Image: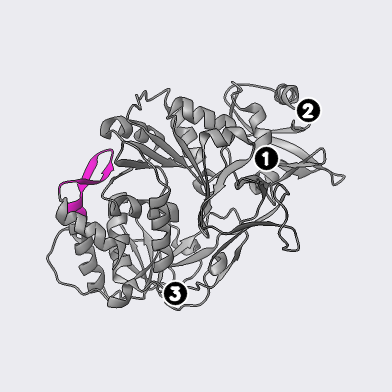
């Protein structure tokens, strides 16, 4: 049985219950179920078969969910991508691209337009392949955010996706609310798995396309939970001045996709909601550690306690485990080891192996994971290796600083210097920023300032420090 069958069952039991909400639309479970059935008949009639691979490029969140759920239930492998990006994606032997409008596709691939008629109930009969729910069968090809190097394509089996749904059930407290507002785009595995979890539980999924829409939807629909990256939550907080919102219905903020500093955690709790849950995870491994706001406050670099059942080690460069409190490379034991997609079979590699996310850190005696930084981003400050977020904390709350990202760059003699890229809110000199930082920490203070109009960012709003180093070299 597929998780989608549970969503369809909700359509029978609770046909009028809100399933998905956007700022201008409410789709019930009955309507969503009808759409999933209609899409299933349409896609099979279009010649797409169980085991085929397709690129899925749909912006409309309701239609994305209907198409993605229909394809997964039929045993068709999906790879969500941003519309217009098909030609830039690695080849995966996909037979078609399914989108909302015609577009360019790689040679040998069909373009299938999911028009309005795809989502209208038709009553057409169709068959579901009994092997579609085989736990070992390939279900999703998920592009990574690129922070471990270049973007990789991670294969997930039916069983691995189901395991991640169960993890979400275990560690998703949302007291007093049944409505989840998601800020994350559907090209991420996080968004797809979270939407599945919400709808399987017969909750209501809200989807906002901007920070301003998110604030309006919280009060309009009485949303109780927000899910977003640090950058997305920061945009919401900044938008509060232009879009006043009471936020009285909020019971929990869940933040993932980037490290949360103590000062930002306090800002979230002061401006949005007192209850904060921070998630450390990746496309390859899923969620690995979780923390509340108090834990983030207590230990610099804390990303949470390692969740029960997760095998995580800190090792040296030779791969040998190190004692608690010793900094080393983080590795996580997972199915497939986070290996990128290889071959064109319909089964994913589920051989357990170690995945190295590229982070440096240590684990405390009570199981708390502390991240010093990414191996490529760690800054050597006076002989001490520190995360760039520690430097960025020095300008947190500065009235002239809208955004700040720290990075290291070697000077002409090969010595690493601390740089701080700034998007100013108002005119300010580099000397003033450096003096402000030195008043808080002489060791961590930047030596150079790079002023920018916009901050280069990668997926989920993560800072693109490689791009910053290139800009600083000009």
Q: Classify residue 235 as left or right of residue 203.
A: right
Task: Give the residue at mark 2.
Answer: 442
Which numbered dot is residue 32? none
Task: Give the residue at mark 1.
Answer: 388
Q: Classify residue 404 as left or right of residue 126.
A: right
> Which sits in the foreground, 169 or 93?
169
Coloring applied to the structure: one colour
Q: Position of residue 423 (x, y in %)?
A: 60, 31
Say which element carries label 3.
Answer: loop
Say which element carries label 2.
Answer: loop
Q: Nearer the viewer, mark 2 or mark 3?
A: 2
> Which sits in the foreground, 382 or 323?
323
- Residue at 40% in and 74% down: 137
Q: Earlier in the sequence, mark 3 or mark 1?
A: 3
Magenta-tinted stretch: 16-32
Q: Residue 363 in magenta? A: no
Q: Residue furthest left?
A: 123
Instruction: Evaluate if marks 1 and 2 touch, with contact meaning CB atoms under 8 Å apart.
Output: no
Classify the position of the C terminus by image quarter. top right
Q: Position of residue 399 (x, y in %)?
A: 59, 20
Q: Position of residue 400 (x, y in %)?
A: 60, 22
Q: Quadrant of residue 206?
A: top left
User: Dot 1: few (<14), some (14–19), or many (≥20) neighbours within 10 Å?
Assistant: many
Task: Give the residue at mark 3.
Answer: 93
């Amino acid at each position: 049985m597929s998780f989608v069958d549970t969503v369809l069952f909700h359509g029978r039991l609770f046909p009028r219950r809100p399933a998905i909400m956007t700022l201008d639309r409410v789709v019930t479970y009955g309507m969503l179920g009808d759409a999933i059935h209609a899409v299933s008949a349409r896609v099979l009639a279009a010649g797409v078969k169980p085991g085929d691979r397709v690129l899925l490029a749909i912006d409309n969140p309701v239609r994305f969910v209907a198409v993605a759920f229909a394809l997964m239930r039929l045993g068709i492998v999906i790879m969500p991508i941003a519309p217009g990006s098909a030609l830039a994606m690695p080849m995966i032997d996909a037979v078609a691209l399914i989108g909302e409008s015609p577009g360019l596709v790689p040679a040998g691939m069909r373009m299938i337009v999911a028009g309005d008629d795809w989502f209208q109930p038709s009553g057409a009969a169709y068959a579901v392949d009994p092997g579609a729910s085989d736990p070992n069968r390939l279900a999703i090809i998920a592009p990574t955010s690129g922070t471990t190097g270049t973007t990789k394509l991670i294969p997930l089996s039916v069983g691995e996706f189901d395991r991640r749904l169960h993890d979400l059930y275990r560690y998703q407290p949302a007291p007093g609310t049944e409505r989840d507002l998601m800020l994350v785009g559907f090209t991420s595995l996080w968004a797809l798995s979270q939407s599945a979890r919400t709808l399987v539980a017969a909750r209501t999924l809200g989807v906002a396309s901007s920070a301003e829409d998110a604030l309006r939807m919280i009060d309009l629909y009485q949303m109780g939970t927000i899910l977003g990256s640090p950058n997305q939550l920061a945009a919401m907080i900044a938008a509060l001045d232009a879009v006043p919102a009471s936020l009285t219905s909020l019971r929990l903020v869940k933040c993932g996709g980037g490290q949360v500093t103590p000062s930002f955690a306090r800002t979230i709790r002061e401006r949005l909601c007192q209850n904060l849950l921070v998630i450390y995870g990746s496309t390859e491994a899923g969620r690995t550690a979780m923390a509340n706001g108090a834990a983030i406050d207590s230990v610099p670099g804390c990303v949470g306690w390692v969740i029960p059942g997760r095998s995580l080690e800190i090792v040296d460069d030779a791969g040998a485990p190190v004692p608690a409190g010793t900094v080393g490379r983080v590795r996580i034991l997972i199915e497939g080891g986070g290996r990128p997609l290889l071959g064109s079979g319909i089964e994913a590699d589920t051989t357990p192996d170690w995945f190295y996310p590229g982070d440096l850190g240590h684990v405390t005696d009570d199981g708390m994971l502390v991240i010093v930084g990414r191996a490529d981003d760690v800054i050597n400050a006076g002989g001490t290796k520190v995360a760039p977020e520690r430097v960025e904390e020095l300008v947190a709350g500065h009235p002239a600083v809208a955004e700040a990202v720290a990075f290291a760059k070697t000077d002409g003699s090969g010595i690493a210097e601390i740089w701080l890229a700034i998007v100013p809110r108002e005119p300010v000199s580099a000397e003033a920023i450096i003096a402000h930082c030195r008043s808080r920490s002489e060791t961590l203070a930047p030596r150079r300032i790079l002023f920018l109009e916009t901050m280069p960012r990668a997926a989920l709003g993560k800072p693109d420090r490689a791009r910053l180093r290139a800009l600083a070299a000009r």
